[in-house]
Amino acid sequence: MSDFSVDINPAGIMAGSRNVMVVTPRGSINPGTTPTLERHVDELIAKHYHTLIMDLTATDFISSSGIGFLLSTANLLREKSGDLILMNPPKLIDDIMANMNIKNYFRTIRRLDDIKHILVP
């Protein structure tokens, strides 16, 4: 199994009264690593961070369990008037989401600066 880690950093951008947080999973998101990612995201949501950017730049693969996690997280955050925004998904992950017909379910940005164009002040 490859190494997996999750970095959490502020985006330096506000959504309402809270800073937008960037979640960066490093490695493969699969049934063995999804619970680790879920734990980190749940901690942010518990602290009332409801707009998250999932930076997929360092993610080399995502399984169906990882896709399910992204979908359920996006739904939960949208119920809280937030969102899960994907940043820079690699071509393989982009293709997986396109093949599953869920690519348009997520707002996607290529760079952190692009977030300013989709967040309403």
Image (spheres, helix red, strand yellow):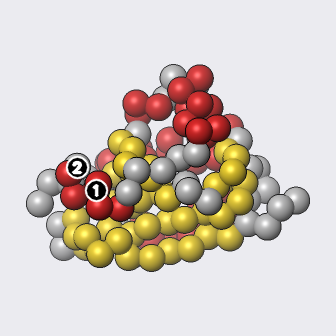
Q: What residue do we see at 74% from left, 50% from top?
A: 30
What residue appears at the point 11 percent right and 60 percent down from the top-left corner?
A: 121
Amino acid type assigned to the residue bearing label 2 in the image: Ile
Name the residue beneath numbered marker 2: 118
Residue 112: percent from the left, percent from the top? 35, 61
Q: Is residue 9 above or below residue 98?
A: below
Kind of element beneath mark 2: loop
In the rendered view, tell whether residue 103 sits above or below residue 34: above
Q: CA distance from mark 2 to mark 1?
A: 5 Å
Q: Amino acid at mark 1?
A: Ile
* Residue at the extreme right: 1
Q: Is 12 displayed left or right of 36 in the figure?
A: left
Along the viewing direction, whichever of 89 and 40 lies nearer the viewer: 89
Residue 95, horizontal then vertical, whole percent: 59, 31
Which quarter of the image is occupied by the N terminus?
bottom right
Q: Are marks 2 and 1 in contact (CB under 8 Å)?
A: yes
**Circle 1: is it few (<14), some (14-19), or many (20+) Cα within 10 Å?**
some
Q: Say which residue appears at 45% left-offset and 76% top-offset.
A: 9
Relative image position of residue 105 (x, y in whole percent): 41, 33
Say which of 78 and 4 sits in front.
4
Where residue 15 sits, quadrant-wise, is: bottom left
Q: Position of residue 42 (x, y in %)?
A: 51, 66
The residue wearing badge 1 is 115
